[in-house]
Each structure stands twice: as C-alpha cells, then as structure tokens.
Image: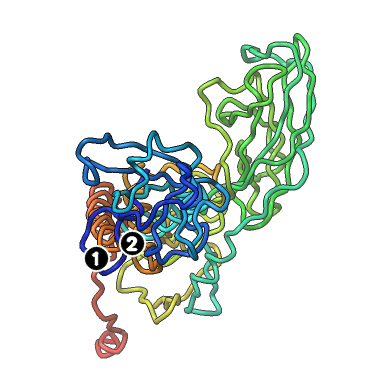
Amino acid sequence: MNLWAGKVDGQAPGPGTFSSVDPQGSLYVVYDVNRPESDNSFNGAYMVINPGGTGNSNLSTIWRKIADDQGFVNKTGAFTLTAPLPSGSYAVQGMTYELYNQFTPEQWLLAVNNALRTSYPQRHRLITFEAAEDPGTRFYDWGRFASGLSLTDPGSAPTASAITDPGGKTNTWAPGVYNIAYSITNAAGETLVSPTTSVTINAGQVLQISPITVPDAAIGVNYWCNSDAGTSDLSQFSVGNGIIPPPSGNVAQYPGVADPTTFIVPQIQFWGPPGRLARRPVDFNTTTLDVLSLKGLKRRINRGQYPERYIDLNPNWWRETGGRNIQIYYDGNDQYALKFECISPVRPLSGETDNTDEPLEIMIAGGMYYLWNVLSMSGSAQNVTIWQAEAKIAEARFNKARNYYQMGTPRKTMRTPFISIRNRWDNFS
C-alpha cells in the first residue's frame, strides 16, 4: 500500500481537503473539486480521512475504500466510498484526507522487468559458445554467432518405454505410471519442457528413453520425470545416473550430450526416478538473449571431443575491429574452435507467474524506483514531490543492492599492438 496523493501539484505537501459536502447528506460520497486526475483514477484505492487528527483533533483517523467502478468523477470531484462514514462530522468542508493505492500485477511486471534489465552489468548471465575456426577468413562476427543460440521449445514428446531390468544397478522404480519429457540446452540456457509421454513401469523394469535429435544450436538435453508414480510434477534426472549403450564406431557418446556431427542424443536408461529435491522445470525459454559484450576468447584444441580442452588465446593474436567483430592474427585450423566468453543481461519475465533467481532486494528496490519515477514523470496528480522523493530513496537502495550482488566477469586482458617480426628474422637468414 503506497501513498498516492494528498494535495494537488503546486501546493505545500500534506493531505488534501474536502471542498464541499454531499447535497443529499449521504455518508457514502465526499468531494474535492480541486483534483485534476481523470475519472476512475482512484478506483479501488483507499482514503485515509482525518490522518493524524489534522482535520479534527477530536476525531479518530479512519480508512475507507473507494468504489471499484466510478469511484472518482473529475467533473464533480466526487469520491464514492464502499462503506459509510461513521458520522456527519467527517463529511464536512475542510476535512483532511490522503489517498493510498496498490500497484497492479501488470505494473509490477513492468517494474520487475525494468529492474532486471537495468541491473546489468552488475547482474548478468555468462554466455559461452564456440565456432569452428575457418582457414578461409580471419574475421568473425561473434554477434551473429550469438544470435543463433536461440532454441525453439520442443513440440513433441520423447519416445520412452519400460524394459526388463538388465541388472548391474539397484532398481528403485516403484510400479506405476510415469510422465517423461525433455528440454533442450545450449550455452545460452534451456528451453521449456516438451510435451510428456506416459510410461507404465512394472516390477523388474527400468525406463529407457530413445535417441533424440536436437537442433544444431543445441548441446544436449535434460530429461524430466515425476518423482512419484501417478503424480504430475516433473523433476530433472541426473544424467550421471543413466547408462547409455556402448558407442558404435570410434565416436564417443555421453549421456544427454548430442553428437557434434549428427546432433543425436544417445539412448539412455534410468534405474530410478529423480529425487524429490531434484531441480524443477524452468518457467520460460532462457535461450532468447541479447549478448552485449565480448569478454574473452579461448581456443579449443579438441573440437568435438570430451572433456573439452582449451587454451587462452594470446591477447596479441586477436583484436576487436568494431561492432561485434574480431580479427585473429594467425591462420585458422578447422580442427580447432574458438570459444567466445560473453555476458548478457538477465532475462526478463514474460508473465506474472514466471520465476527468477535474481535477489529479491534488487527486484523490489528497482521496481519501486521504476514505479515512482513513472508516476512523477507522467502524472498530473497530487504529491509529485512525494513520488520524486520515494523514487530517489528507491534508486539509492537499488544501486546499493546492485553493487552488493555484483558478479564477476572474465576480465579483458590489456592488449598491446601486434607487431610482425617476420622481416626481422629474414635479415638473419
């Protein structure tokens, strides 16, 4: 609940006053013809009458809610209350009042998203992605590479079945019906969970999920299942608890990881459901992003193999050439890949029910700063001075929270100009 209005602009701070009494003697209607706001501006708001005894020291301070429909009419200055005043002593000319209101969920969604976006660069997401070195060029547009990280949510359920327990591990499946799904992951994040497929697992059986083909911008998948038979809440499998079949040929396979050439995630078997404390599905597709800054560059020397092996690229061997482009100062090798280390703002919410892991202090302080600032800039309402003061307080708290929760980033190495020494060596040949 926030102080919304008192006196009109240009007047000294303080409560407003009733300009007249209801001609019908109703205790449900009070008037202030000096209010400049449009009709219905205060629908559903709360009126504090005689705040602190400023209108009549012999009367108590009371609260009344303003009607949700036609609660305020600008032409007459009439406020319609949902409950009558306790006596006519409150419905007199010169009685003081203040208006309090609540911000709507839609306003708070805008405010929280603004707080999330403006918390950058103190708060951010570290985004890393790779691109194969191209012997035919020394210029790379990392911005274009980053734009290809967005993934579409899977539209079909995985193929899964119950098979006879092959042994070798402890089977913890309880007989019953289980819902199986998957989500696709890459360096930018994770998609929403796919539609589910139901599998009935009996005693002596385990779960088997068939191979999944993912887009070329994906790294792999996460698997999901309900922890208890017959329930609907999904939890994430730990791929470390799964077993995949022996690889065919010389291509190594890893649980939940797509083959870098075929983009097929191998078949996998699980000997039990996820634990009850396992991770829950994300509320929005986190792969949609706006990568804003390149912080570092590494070279992968075992492209397509695991575990990954990287070396820091000599700072004298590459430089930024403007925009989102870089130039390398050596001949590329298509057996190697470049790993770009970038940062991106925290992803905003897409709906009122979305979740975020961002600190609550940042969202509240940043949200209040946004709301009070918008009111003070866009309203012809009362107590703009108060709104500006509230915005200033919220801004200070927001900046303090951003600095307190500031995250580290890969630090750019100071680079010296690249100098070719080829001609110098030629003089000694």
The answer for how far apart the CA atoms under marks 2 and 1 are is 9 Å
Quarter of the image where the C terminus is located: bottom left
| Residue depicted at 30% across the width and 55% down the height | 16
Q: Who is closer to the viewer here, 304 or 155?
A: 155
SS at badge 1: loop
Q: Amino acid at mark 2?
A: Gln
Q: Which residue is mark 1?
A: 11
Q: Nearer the viewer, residue 100 or 240?
A: 100
Residue occupying the point 55% across, 72% down: 134
**Of callouts 2 and 1, the N-terminal one:** 1
Residue at image coords 50%, 71%: 143
Q: In the image, is residue 23 above or below residue 266?
A: below
Is label 2 in contact with label 1 (beta carbons under 8 Å)?
yes
Closer to us: 15 or 314 = 15
Left of 43 or right of it: where is 157? Answer: right
Q: Position of residue 160 (x, y in %)?
A: 77, 30
Q: Which residue is painted at 38% across and 62% down in the image?
A: 375
- x then y, percent, for residue 210: 76, 35
Q: Which residue is mark 2?
A: 382
| Residue furthest out toward the front | 24
Q: Residue 21: in sight, yes or no?
A: yes
Residue 175 shown left or right of residue 222 in the figure: right
Indicate which label's residue lies in the foreground, 2 or 1. Answer: 1
Q: Where's residue 279, x and y in %?
A: 53, 31
Q: Residues within 10 Å of mark 1 (few under 14, many from 20)?
A: few
Amino acid type of disc 1? Answer: Gln
- In this view, the residue farthest toward the top is 203
